Image (cartoon, rainbow, N blue to C red):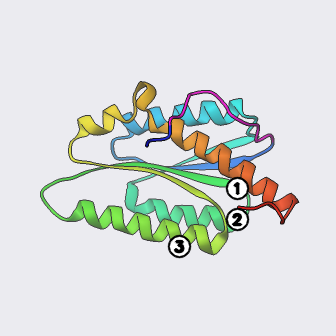
């Protein structure tokens, strides 16, 4: 069963600092996810939402690593759109992001919420960036949830995960 998210804030993350890394390809569509998540994070009390635009999705993992290394962020959200073409480039980009973002998350203990949309046609991406289907809603709520959990875990190590 799919978890439903509402575009309302479920908890407060007052003072949190969040980085958003966005691939520039299909920016006109991913901008909607970025705007929605920023709005929700600010409504939850987020102190700072920094947005970093990179040339494409291939640059997202290294940029995320550099941001995680600073220790300034409670979480990083990544956005991008990969449209399948006639070659395996789509798979290379997707698998590289999954592998390397996981590595960054575990190496630096900074949660990374990934909304890189692998789609077969641009209309599929548009559907995932509009209205209730906007993946920015899910990303913001997941960020709020994980920052809240990690704050609880930091205060009381006996809290079950």
131 or 92: nearer the viewer: 131
Residue 15 lies left or right of residue 67; in this view the side is: right
Disc 2 from disc 3: Cα separation = 16 Å
Q: Residues within 10 Å of mark 2 (few under 14, many from 20)?
A: few
7 or 3: nearer the viewer: 3
Q: Percent position (x, y) of residue 16?
A: 75, 46
Q: Which residues are magenta?
A: 4-14
Q: Quadrant of residue 152?
A: bottom right
Q: Percent position (x, y) of residue 3?
A: 50, 40
Q: Is 6 colored magenta in this rendering?
A: yes
- Residue that label 3 marks: 103
Disc 1 from disc 3: Cα separation = 17 Å
Q: Quadrant of residue 135?
A: top left
The answer to the question of whether label 1 and label 2 lie on touching residues, with beta carbons closer than 8 A, is yes
Q: Circle 1 — which element? A: loop
* Mark 1 or mark 3: whose residue is earlier in sequence: 1
Above or below 161: residue 45: above
Q: Residues within 10 Å of mark 1 (few under 14, many from 20)?
A: some
- Residue that label 2 marks: 70
Disc 1 from disc 2: Cα separation = 8 Å
Residue drawn at the location 83% of the way across and 66% of the way down: 157
Q: Which mark identifies residue 17?
A: none
Q: Circle 3 — which element? A: helix
- Residue that label 1 marks: 73
Name the residue at the front extreme.
1
Name the residue at the top extreme.
131
Residue 34 visible within the image:
no
Above or below 110: residue 76: above
Q: Percent position (x, y) of residue 95?
A: 35, 67
Residue drawn at the location 63% of the way across and 32% of the way down: 40
Residue drawn at the location 33% of the way across and 41% of the way down: 26
């Amino acid at each position: 069963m799919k978890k439903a998210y509402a575009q309302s804030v479920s908890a407060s993350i007052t003072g949190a600092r969040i980085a958003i890394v966005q691939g520039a390809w299909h920016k006109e569509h991913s901008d909607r996810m970025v705007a929605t998540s920023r709005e929700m994070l600010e409504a939850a009390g987020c102190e700072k939402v920094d947005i970093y635009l990179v040339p494409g999705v291939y640059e997202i993992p290294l940029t995320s690593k550099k941001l995680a290394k600073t220790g300034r962020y409670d979480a990083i959200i990544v956005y991008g759109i990969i449209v399948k073409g006639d070659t395996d480039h789509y798979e290379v980009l997707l698998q590289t992001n999954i592998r390397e973002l996981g590595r960054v998350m575990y190496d630096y203990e900074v949660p990374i919420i990934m909304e890189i949309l692998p789609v077969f046609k641009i209309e599929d991406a548009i559907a995932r960036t509009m209205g209730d289907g906007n993946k920015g809603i899910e990303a913001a709520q997941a960020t709020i949830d994980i920052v809240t959990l990690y704050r609880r875990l930091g205060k009381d190590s006996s809290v079950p995960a």
